[in-house]
Amino acid sequence: MVTISSASTKPTWISALLLVLATTTIRVHGQSSTSGFISLDCGYRNTTPYTDHKIQGIQHQSDVGFIEGGLTNQVAAAFMAGAEYESQKTLRSFPNGSRNCYTLPSATGKKFLVRALFTYGNYDGLNRTMDGSLFRFGLHIGVNFWEAVNLTNMHPSSTIWKEVLTVAPGDSVSVCLINFGTGTPFVSSLELRPLQDAMYPFVNSSMSISYFRRIRFGTATEYITRYPLDPYDRFWEGWSFSYNTYPWMTLNTSTQVRRLPGDNTFQVPEGILQGATTLDTNYSFFEINVAAGPNLDAKNLQLLPIFHFAEINISNQNRRFDIYSDNDLLFPDFSPSRFQADSMHQNGRFLHNPAAIFLLNKTRSSRLPPLINAFEVYSPVRMDNLTTDAEDAHYMNEVKKHYNLARINWNGDPCSPREYSWEGLTCDYSKRNQNPRIVAVDLSTSGLKGGLVIAFMNMVSLENLDLSHNNLTGAIPDYQIKSLRVLDLSYNQLDGPIPDSILQRSRAGILDLRLEGNPVCSKVKDTYCSNKKKNKSTMLIAVIVPVVLVSLLVVMCILWKLCWKGKSADNEDYAMYEEETPLHIDIRRFTYADLKHITNDFKQIVGKGGFGTVYHGTMENGDEVAVKVLMETSIAESTDFLPEVQTLSKVHHKNLVTLQGYCQNTKCLALVYDFMPRGNLQQLLREGDDYSLTWEQRLHIALDSAQGLEYLHESCTPSIVHRDVKTANILLDKNLVGIIADFGLSRAFNDAHTHISTVAAGTLGYLDPEYHATFQLTIKTDVYSFGIVLLEIITGKPPVLMDPHTYHLPNWVRQKIAKGGIQDIVDKRLLDQYDPSSLQSVVDLAMNCVESAAVDRPSMTEVVSRLKVLLPTTPSSKVYASASSTKSTNDIMRKQFQLLISGDGNEESSSSFQSGYTNQSGYTSRMAELPALSGR
Ligand SMILES: *[C@@H]1O[C@H](CO)[C@@H](O)[C@H](O)[C@H]1NC(C)=O
Ligand SMILES: *[C@@H]1O[C@H](CO)[C@@H](O)[C@H](O)[C@H]1NC(C)=O
Ligand SMILES: *[C@@H]1O[C@H](CO)[C@@H](O)[C@H](O)[C@H]1NC(C)=O
Ligand SMILES: *[C@@H]1O[C@H](CO)[C@@H](O)[C@H](O)[C@H]1NC(C)=O
Ligand SMILES: *[C@@H]1O[C@H](CO)[C@@H](O)[C@H](O)[C@H]1NC(C)=O
Ligand SMILES: *[C@@H]1O[C@H](CO)[C@@H](O)[C@H](O)[C@H]1NC(C)=O
């Protein structure tokens, strides 16, 4: 922030410092102690600590052992000669990696000053600061952004420094250099100084402050005053070395300047308070301009000023003044106490002061102009991001050490901040105000050697551990991690007995264990030792005559290749990656070729979205199907997909879409569902002004969907939360029966991408408000969304209304009812053909479902019974009397409906059914709507 540029080749502030050292030696105060000081000379290779004879009493040491990567460098010879301050001669640069972190030991909750110094010194011979391009990199304190270092246009001999006052979140403090892509980050020295807990009380675990400027007034012969005058080794800049725009007068005293007993907040050294700056008595105000040059981003500047005063003039004349920040009067009519320290600050309040100018103005009654002894200004560093759970981080570091993993980004905190999280880890950030946890570790094909490290056992949040395709040896340890769902140890050299607890969990279906390709499998013949689902005899054959099998495979491969010759490369990939599933799924498994055939080469697209594309298909027996091809490759690797399909294949209910089959290979995943010719409810409600569903049809569809949800919630164990109930996910079969789609799948997606799970569930307008606070998805989340669906059914309006103002549907309904009456909200296309009392009941039910507190919402069972009351089990003439009859097709539809609800619906009568609809699939996706939500 502060630079002194000159044309000399001497590192400039150092020459000024020399003066200090010459004079401060006589000022050493007895109480100074360097205990707890850490002073790293970055890039210094000699491991023996040294004392720089120019900085009394502080031991410097090499940074080896505090950092893993980086290159050691020296400043160019031209600057070397002038550098009399040892630590400025060398530096460590970081050409590789986007984040490189130093780890400094500390104690949890301890307050520290951390300072980093930078002297470029043209170490790389590139004249990088002066080559006209931007030279800027970033600093993190722990997992939070601290400040940018902008060296653009600086003289290579300049030294700049950054300081932060912070509280250690754990037993270490890390300082990271961030590569912004505008120049290689480097650092010359790094210093850590313990502070007392009572100092700077506004610094706590959620707020750190970054040094902006720290000035001592009065006469100072030195540019920087530091240790030992200041036992905390803060850098105090001499004001006399700054501009001279005012008729300054300096005051100095040797009389003692006291601090009030118990005033330990700032501990400004007495030697500094014994000097002050004031003005010629003809003047009445002065400005302290701390704007620090062009390399600073002043626009968003927020500053926290701390003024230190002590009246050290022996005359008894009164001195009163107003203290302003820009135009903001901070302290009116202040009068400094005689020979006593007064520190004025606003309890950690940050002020918007883009000009960085502070004004001291004499009041009318004052005889003397203002005076000031010392001044500190800080800017905020918000510590919003939490470090990874300490245990997880500890054990993950143990794993890293054990296997000697020199992965380039395995540096600093494992999970935080998100964009720098370690490659191969999946972290759970979903619990606000809680440290991120590691839920998945993927170290497959990482060249791991030796035994399985026990550290994993202590990671209690771990769900998925993939150590496949390494060279791990020895026995399998008894990994008793309750949360573990997938343990993939395939293709290693593991041997010895498999621990019972693991076997039991695997057999119980709680743990997906994979051991194929290990010596241990030569003795065991169980499903976890095979990536193929096959019976014992084929297994035997496979063991006895593997050669035959291999040759067969080769032949098959060649045949495949021949078959696919001339086809697109994509197709070939799919075909080649066909593989068997390790799970027992009772539904049909399709190959890619099957799907291609069924869909007539993927000819007719009936829906599109983030999950993939939906194609129309016709099975061999003539049944129409919807083929949803999930294209995202990461899903293909997802271990959650198949278990989810397994779950879905077991869910059977007349109001839930039936999964006919699936296709799984490494490059393509697809689900095959019954085709729903009438599209989805959203289309029916919004499209086409010439025809509308009748009130009874709407009620029936509502009841159908409610029953589907009730089944998911109450009859499945564990209950399935749909997570994305909306009109677009309510499909209609040819008899207009409401069928719920897209349940379960969202879970496979979300769990595979834990980092998006907090936003991926739900669609804008349907999402439970409580979810934003708790991030917990419960069955009541679905009830809320269903309430929105009911409101849409009543009003025919979308969940979020745009015209003329943006309204959330429940609010719109409330307002309309409050202003007019219930008739104002009803879909106009119903042409008043509805039973007002049943309408009132449905509105009540809907509003009940969208209660903001989940506990106040009914269960789906209650919803179902309340809807059932409104619909007679056999249609009466009364029901029909209230139905809309604007179009001739309605009569047919009504007849159809009658058959349906009376249980008489059959194929013949259905096939006679005609309508003006175009066939549309309702397989839409929520992913396209994600960006709107992710900003939360
Ligand atoms: C940086 O990366 C380059 C190329 O990837 C490599 O050759 C070099 O050894 C790496 N340097 C360090 C210090 O890791
Ligand atoms: C560095 O670049 C500046 C500006 O281009 C030039 O004036 C200066 O001589 C260069 N210095 C060296 C050492 O190359
Ligand atoms: C916290 O992390 C987020 C996401 O990684 C990042 O965008 C944000 O800047 C970080 N906040 C701070 C204060 O560093
Ligand atoms: C960095 O400093 C240069 C030179 O003063 C300035 O032009 C540039 O705007 C600064 N960049 C940022 C991002 O502050
Ligand atoms: C200083 O205070 C006087 C009144 O005491 C006022 O008239 C004057 O404008 C102030 N000066 C500045 C620069 O604010
Ligand atoms: C795996 O380890 C074994 C035993 O240490 C060794 O013989 C073998 O060469 C290793 N294989 C690989 C691929 O590193």
Image: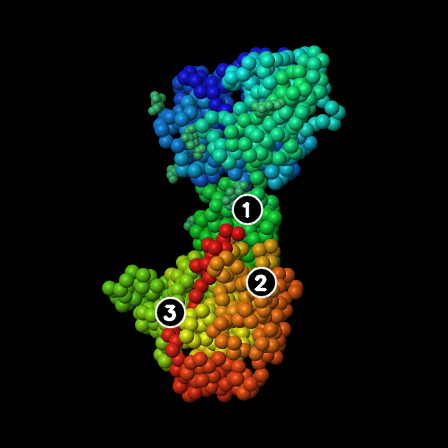
For discs 3 and 1, the disc positioned in front in the rendered view:
3
Residue type, label 3: Val
Q: Disc 2 versus disc 3: distance between alpha carbons?
A: 38 Å
Q: In this orientation, which residue lies closer to the viewer: 701 or 389? A: 701
Asked if the residues shown at circle 2 and circle 1 are in contact, with their CB atoms under 8 angstroms apart, the answer is: no
Q: In this orientation, which residue lies closer to the viewer: 171 or 828? A: 828
Q: Residue at x 48, y 55 (%)?
A: 932
> Is residue 329 at all visible to an observer of this figure?
yes
Residue type, label 2: Gln
Residue 273, position as x, y percentages in the image: 65, 18
Q: Residue at x 59, y 35 (%)?
A: 350
Q: What residue sits right under mark 2 in the picture?
A: 815
Q: What residue sits right under mark 3 in the picture?
A: 606
For discs 2 and 3, the disc positioned in front in the rendered view:
2
Q: Disc 3 versus disc 1: distance between alpha carbons?
A: 46 Å
Of mark 2 and mark 3, the one earlier in the sequence is 3
Asked if the residues shown at circle 2 and circle 3 are in contact, with their CB atoms under 8 angstroms apart, the answer is: no
* Mark 2 nearby-residue class (10 Å; few <14, some 14–19, many ≥20): few
* Identity of the residue furthest to the front in this view: 820
Q: What residue sits right under mark 1 in the picture?
A: 396
Q: Vertically, is 763 above or below 355?
A: below
Label 1 SS: helix
Q: Residue at x 36, y 63 (%)?
A: 577
Q: Quadrant of residue 868?
A: bottom right
